[in-house]
């Protein structure tokens, strides 16, 4: 039976889970909470060693993050990235531009970072103001520095299983959570709920790759899929990334499935000091009664996104040091 891990201070108490299990008649088989913070800390421990080795060779990984405008959520996210860079000893550049910045001005700043040899990763925080053509900005990035993994060249490399490319951070974090939690992906049926280029599509490509961390049979469903619950109930692993609060219910999964919740949504809550609470795309209380393992929100997938951004930046620096050579293969 899985050990129970509970992220502290986030409302996911052992008592809450015991209650859920008791109501379901599962008092001796509580679901495993997949603790994203603990796995992220393991990633950071590995990165500390990797970065020290790179610095010993005279190479300090550098990340430039560009924020256009004053969106509060984006500003908080950029601060978190900058803080983690500094904790890991990376060279960090945080460029904050006014919302009035033009497309031409932003492209010029991106090109400056493309040419800067001290910068190995570039990220333009999404979403930018409405007058900015985000797709054009992504295409303007040097794909060797596109640590978000959205440049067309990196998307193609993911399809072709070319290890020199960069995989978007959230799908990469989901894969790492599964592996670190000893959840078998090889041969498993994975249903991904959501088809975005940020999560759904790249995650499907990643998990079906022919290597020891993939080999899954992947089905992608979305808001227009017929018989959606029937499809999700056939899955060993369900990944919810549809962007709709508590959409995935207990009748969407079979007993003993693994559930990964990528979503993060604000819902009104008069009992909260902030007037709202954060929930995922999964109705946690009812789904946890049936799941073998499940990620909480917050504290599940979220911490992994920044961790994998840092890992991609270190990878970019390593490849720079090797003259662009890809990472060693992960096996077949």
Image: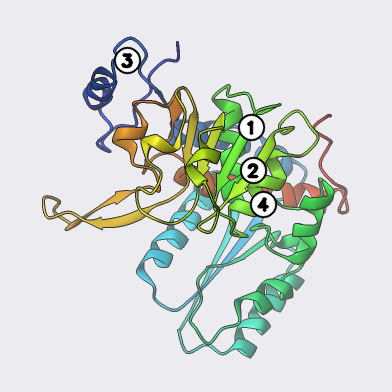
Q: Nearer the viewer, residue 168 or 147?
A: 168
Percent across and percent down for residue 253 are 46, 33
- The quadrant of the rendering that contains the C terminus is top right
How far is disc 2 from disc 4 in space, using C-alphas?
13 Å
Tag 3's secondary structure?
Answer: loop
Relative to 62, is 88 on the left or the right? left
How far is disc 3 from disc 2 in space, using C-alphas?
29 Å
Mark 4 or mark 3, whichever is nearer to me: 3
Callout 2–callout 1 Cβ contact below 8 Å: yes
Tag 4's secondary structure?
Answer: helix
Percent across and percent down for residue 214 are 72, 34
Closer to the chain start, of discs 2 and 4, is: 4
Which residue corresponds to mark 3?
A: 26
Relative to 299, is 8 on the left or the right? left
Residue at figure coordinates x 30%, y 50% from the top left: 278
Which residue corresponds to mark 1?
A: 189
How far is disc 1 from disc 4 in space, using C-alphas?
16 Å
Residue at figure coordinates x 70%, y 61% from the top left: 146
Mark 1 or mark 4, whichever is nearer to me: 1
Which residue corresponds to mark 4?
A: 202
Which residue corresponds to mark 2?
A: 219
Residue at figure coordinates x 68%, y 57% from the top left: 149
Residue at figure coordinates x 47%, y 89% from the top left: 100
Closer to the chain start, of discs 4 and 3, is: 3
Q: Nearer the viewer, residue 187 or 111?
A: 187
Asked whether the viewer can see residue 89, the reply is no
């Amino acid at each position: 039976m899985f050990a129970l891990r509970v992220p502290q201070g986030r409302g996911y108490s052992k008592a809450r889970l015991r209650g859920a299990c008791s109501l379901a008649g599962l008092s001796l088989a509580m679901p495993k909470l997949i603790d994203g913070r603990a796995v992220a800390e393991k990633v950071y421990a590995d990165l500390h060693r990797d970065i020290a080795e790179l610095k010993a060779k005279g190479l300090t990984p550098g990340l430039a993050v560009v924020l256009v405008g004053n969106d509060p959520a984006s500003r908080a996210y950029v601060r978190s990235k900058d803080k983690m860079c500094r904790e890991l000893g990376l060279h960090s550049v945080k460029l904050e531009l006014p919302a009035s910045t033009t497309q031409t001005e932003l492209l010029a700043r991106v090109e400056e970072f493309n040419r800067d040899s001290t910068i190995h990763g570039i990220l333009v925080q999404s979403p930018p103001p409405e007058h900015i053509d985000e797709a054009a900005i992504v295409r303007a990035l040097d794909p060797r520095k596109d640590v978000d993994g959205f440049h067309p060249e990196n998307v193609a490399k993911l399809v072709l299983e070319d290890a020199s490319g960069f995989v978007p951070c959230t799908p990469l974090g989901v894969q790492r959570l599964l592996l670190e939690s000893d959840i078998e992906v090889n041969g498993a049926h994975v249903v991904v709920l959501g088809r975005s280029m940020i999560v759904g599509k790249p995650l499907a490509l990643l998990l079906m790759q022919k290597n020891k961390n993939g080999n899954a049979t992947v089905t992608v469903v979305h808001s227009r899929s017929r018989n959606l619950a029937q499809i999700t109930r056939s899955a060993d692993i369900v990944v919810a990334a549809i962007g709709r609060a508590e959409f995935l219910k207990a009748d969407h999964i079979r007993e003993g499935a693994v559930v990964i919740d990528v979503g993060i949504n604000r819902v009104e809550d008069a009992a909260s000091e902030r007037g709202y609470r954060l929930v995922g795309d999964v109705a946690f209380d009812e789904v946890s009664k049936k799941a073998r393992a499940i990620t909480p929100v917050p504290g599940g997938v979220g911490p992994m996104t920044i961790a994998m951004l840092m890992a991609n930046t270190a990878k970019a620096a390593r490849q720079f040091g090797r003259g662009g050579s890809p990472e060693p293969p992960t096996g077949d």
